[in-house]
Image (cartoon, helix red, strand yellow):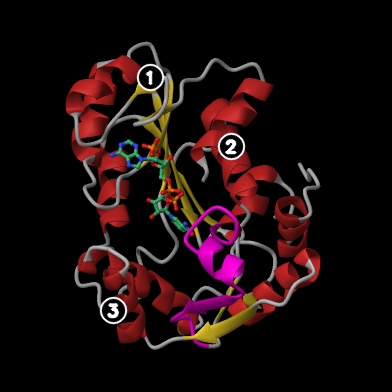
Amino acid sequence: MTGRRVLARLRERGVAARAASRSSEWRFDWSEPGTWDTVLEGAGSVYLVQNDADPRTGEFVERAVALGVERIVQLSARGVDVPGYFEGVEGDPSHLRSEEAVKAGGLEWTVLRPGWFAQNFDEGFLTDGLSTGVLRIPAGDGAAAWIDAEDIAAVAVAALTEPGHHGRTYELSGPRALTVAEAVAEISAVLGRPIRYEAVPAEEYVAELVEQGWPKEGAQELVSALSAIRRGQEAETAPGVREALGREPRDFSAYVAAAFAGEAVRS
Ligand SMILES: NC(=O)c1ccc[n+]([C@@H]2O[C@H](COP(=O)([O-])OP(=O)(O)OC[C@H]3O[C@@H](n4cnc5c(N)ncnc54)[C@H](OP(=O)(O)O)[C@@H]3O)[C@@H](O)[C@H]2O)c1
């Protein structure tokens, strides 16, 4: 959700940039190290989004350094340094281990720690619920200060192209917290059709996802991540957008207008 936005913003600024994923022109696959060099050769800076299922950040950073990359901006996640933030996760979350590898690599580095993305509603795993009119997830009555992926991309581009961001870890959130029910109500109002939120117990949700073909481990990871909303940890706002860009993050209503009413809202 962030990679294509980072790319678009870089190109708008006239910065030469390569997309690097399994479906991009320059094919890059985390699980095939043989594809890494092609995207790294000649690159001065890298925007790194780990593969959560199989993070290989240490190996990748070593290769990037060997090929002359000087700067790395890593997409991590909020709460990764807070013990117990993700219910049921023992030991360090993989994002934190990736952060350590990025910081140890000897490059200029910036870490982005966003909370839950607003774009999960129109591009991510919440889209199905909105289509059926009933969004069922195990988030209880908890709220999140949903961050707009456009803001994450704006911070990433600043860190990739400007001085002053080396050694910074930006905690990123939107400007206010909304419960899932409140978020859904805003979307429902813009779409002009009823959509409701139904809180489901975690075990029931895991069973449903597994029935739909999800690997059990992946379903449990999603539930752990959602526990941070249910337990109120994602409701607190974070200062990273202001620190990095000198402006406030965009409000959830602006995201809803852009995503669901077809209006282009760009900062
Ligand atoms: N979603 C959230 O609310 C949220 C919040 C905080 C942090 N995060 C973190 O943000 C990161 C991205 O999450 P997301 O929700 O944006 O994921 P996403 O929408 O699934 O995006 C993942 C991207 O990675 C590419 N990709 C997947 N497997 C790949 C592979 N083996 N090799 C190369 N590229 C691969 C995909 O493109 P191709 O299919 O073309 O390869 C896709 O563009 C994750 O680390 C997640 O933990 C997410």
Mark 2 CB in 8 Å range of ligand 1?
no
SS under mark 3: helix
Query: What's the magenta region?
Result: 120-140
- The quadrant of the rendering that contains the C terminus is top right
User: Percent x, y for residue 13?
Assistant: 67, 21
Q: Say which residue label 3 marks.
A: 207
Q: Viewer-nearest of labels 3 and 2?
A: 3
Left or right of 167 in this view: 120: right
Left or right of 207 in this view: 134: right
Left or right of 97 in this view: 133: right
The crowd level at tag 3 (other Cα within 10 Å; few <14, some 14-19, many 20+) is some
* Amino acid type indicated by mark 3: Ala
Residue at position x 44%, y 86% in the image: 200
Cα distance in 3D space between marks 3 and 2? 34 Å
The crowd level at tag 2 (other Cα within 10 Å; few <14, some 14-19, many 20+) is some
**Residue 77 quadrant:** bottom left
Rendered position, 205 above or below 44: below
Rendered position, 184 above or below 49: below
Q: Is residue 129 magenta?
A: yes
**Residue 21 quadrant:** top left
Q: Which mark is residue 5?
A: 2
Using the image as rendered, state which of residue 205 and residue 63 is in the foreground.
205
**Residue 44 quadrant:** top left
User: Percent x, y for residue 240?
Assistant: 59, 54
